Amino acid sequence: AQKVTQAQTEISVVEKEDVTLDCVYETRDTTYYLFWYKQPPSGELVFLIRRNSFDEQNEISGRYSWNFQKSTSSFNFTITASQVVDSAVYFCALSEGGSEKLVFGKGTKLTVNP
Amino acid sequence: KAGVTQTPRYLIKTRGQQVTLSCSPISGHRSVSWYQQTPGQGLQFLFEYFSETQRNKGNFPGRFSGRQFSNSRSEMNVSTLELGDSALYLCASSLAGYSYEQYFGPGTRLTVT
């Protein structure tokens, strides 16, 4: 069965600090996809990244970076030099190959204080 | 390109009533999925439609149903509303329906009293 665990319920940092959000997943499929979404207070889920199970290369996009490690079933997300606008709930999600069904973690609420 | 739109944005209904929510996907997207978000259960998958066919269904009672039209627009219906159905209902669309990235709408906030 699919499962996504985000152990950190809430994180609070001061602006310009780096912060890492953890995500651990479980799946029996060899083909699967991992996602990160951001949900600001407005409520709309914003797509951040999609990664397939065959691509373990880390990715960097501006201040955002993702570390995918199949050996530990983890897909962690780091924000460098955090800003107040990064305050949101961040969700990690998993879909098994061929399915649009996303299984979400419970989310991590990030608060960046000025 | 316009994003995913959902109507209405807010609804208040009474127990026992039924409700229909609407979702218009991004132009060109053929897959539409629905999710329920509550503080207790988090984000849960309801169902997914692709080319007017339901391809996948989550673990929800039969009171929850949906459909997709030929223009890819989708509706979901909840009959015999219960207090526990109060939630944010999110619709997402994707290009072709194979674990592609899904883009979400702003959601419909349903309150059942």
Image: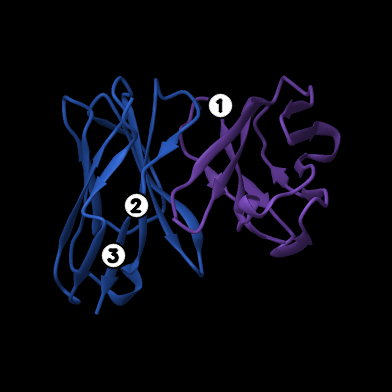
| Relative horizontal placement of residue B88, taking residue A70 as reference (left or right) | left
Question: Which color has been applied to chain B in this rendered view?
Answer: blue
> Regarding mark 1 in the picture, which secondary structure is present there?
loop
Quadrant in the picture for the C terminus of chain B: bottom left
Residue at image x 14%, y 70%? B17
- Name the residue that disc number 2 marks: B107
Q: Work out how far the residue at label 1 is from the one at label 3, CA to CA, in angstroms.
A: 32 Å
Q: How many marks?
A: 3
Q: Could you tell me residue B20's position as x and y percent?
A: 17, 54
Question: Which color has been applied to chain A in this rendered view?
Answer: purple
Residue at image x 22%, y 38%? B74
Vertical order, B9 against A65 (above or below): below
Question: Mark 3 belongs to which subunit?
Answer: B
Give the class, few, some or many, for how many residues have Cα within 10 Å of label 1's Cα (few <14, many ≥20). Answer: some
* Residue A97, label in figure: 1
| Relative horizontal placement of residue A112, taking residue B72 as reference (left or right) | right
Q: Tags 1 and 3 in contact by the CB under 8 Å rule?
A: no
Residue at image x 21%, y 33%? B73
- Name the residue that disc number 3 marks: B110
Front disc: 2 or 1: 2
Residue A94 lies in what quarter of the image?
Answer: top right
Residue A29 lies in what quarter of the image?
Answer: top right
Q: Please state which amino acid type lies under the numbered disc 3.
A: Leu
Q: Could you tell me residue A58's position as x and y percent?
A: 79, 26
